[in-house]
Amino acid sequence: MEIPDEKLVKLFRLDKYLRVNVSEETQKFLDYENKTNKIPVFTRFLAALNFNGSGSFETSVSQELNIVLSQPVVSRCLNKISAIFTNHLLARYVKFPVTEEHIHSVKQGFQVKLQFPHVIGAIDCKCVAIFTPEGTDISNPALSYLNRKGYYCINGQAICDSEMIFANISSRYPGATYDIAIWQTSTVNNHLQTRYLNGERRIWLIWVSGYPIQPWMMTAVPDALEDTPKGIYTTF
């Protein structure tokens, strides 16, 4: 708790309040292991957070906080904590659309501060590198995970609000899947379309390009000329 918030966020992507809160929730699902596992729950939790925050075993918790864990141990911690996040905590912390009540449940004293009141989030896809698949699954061949940049990955779509609170995450598509294909089959697209047809005409997601312009999706117009209507819209 004596570590400055700036350093905590760099190492774990969480400040003190969220780190303690989430670790306490995680501990509920690890208590049964405490008698057989000599590594404290909080240490395993920090190891998993650090890996997720840095994406590398090399930037390790042991270097920063003098917690000595081998790479195989970190790997086991990561698998266990990630399963808990996915199966038990994800639905609580990631909700679409983001509401003020939800933000208060995630972080006490937090206030919604949307720069544009009708914009409910920003959307983008991100390729997360993976080891080369074995290619034994005929319905999901290894080649489908090879993206246009030449490496194997999962293409994940995420939506967050102006305070960087995640509202939706989809990480089930192979890397060769186009961003627009993920969007067109997403539950969020269907949700916003339904709201639009029901008369809600002033709610939007935003991003720079790569997604289609829809009544509920505002994207930049590539190569729009300055001072033209398209240019003014894109700059705004």
Image (cartoon, helix red, strand yellow):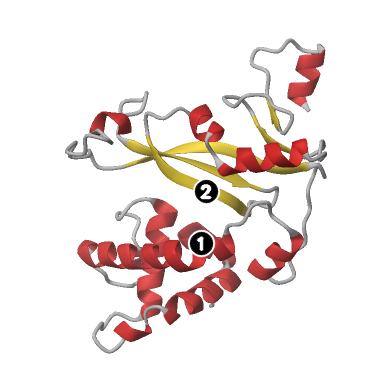
Q: Is residue 203 left or right of residue 152?
A: right
Q: Is residue 99 left or right of residue 77?
A: right
Q: Residue at x 74, y 65 (%)?
A: 101
As rendered, which of 25 and 92 lies closer to the eye?
92
Q: Do labels 2 and 1 touch, CB within 8 Å? A: yes
Tell me the number on the disc at residue 144. Answer: none
Whole-percent x and y of residue 140? 28, 36
As rendered, which of 13 and 183 lies closer to the eye?
183
What's the distance in space between the residues labelled 2 and 1, CA to CA?
A: 10 Å
Q: Is residue 126 above or below residue 96?
A: above
State the residue position of label 2: 169
**What element does badge 2 sit on?**
strand
Amino acid type, residue under disc 1 in the picture: Leu
Counting residues from the start of the chain, the first of labels 2 and 1 encountered is 1
Q: Is residue 38 above or below residue 230?
A: below
Which of the 4 image quarters holds residue 152? Answer: top left
**What element does badge 1 sit on?**
helix
Whole-percent x and y of residue 157? 51, 41
Whole-percent x and y of residue 236? 78, 28
Q: Residue at x 76, y 36 (%)?
A: 197
Q: Is residue 136 left or right of residue 149?
A: left
Q: Is residue 229 above or below residue 158?
A: above
Q: Residue at x 70, y 40 (%)?
A: 194
Which of the 4 image quarters holds residue 70? Answer: bottom left
Tell me the number on the disc at residue 90. Answer: 1
Amino acid type, residue under disc 2 in the picture: Ile
As rendered, which of 155 and 7 lies closer to the eye?
155
Q: Is residue 10 visible?
A: yes
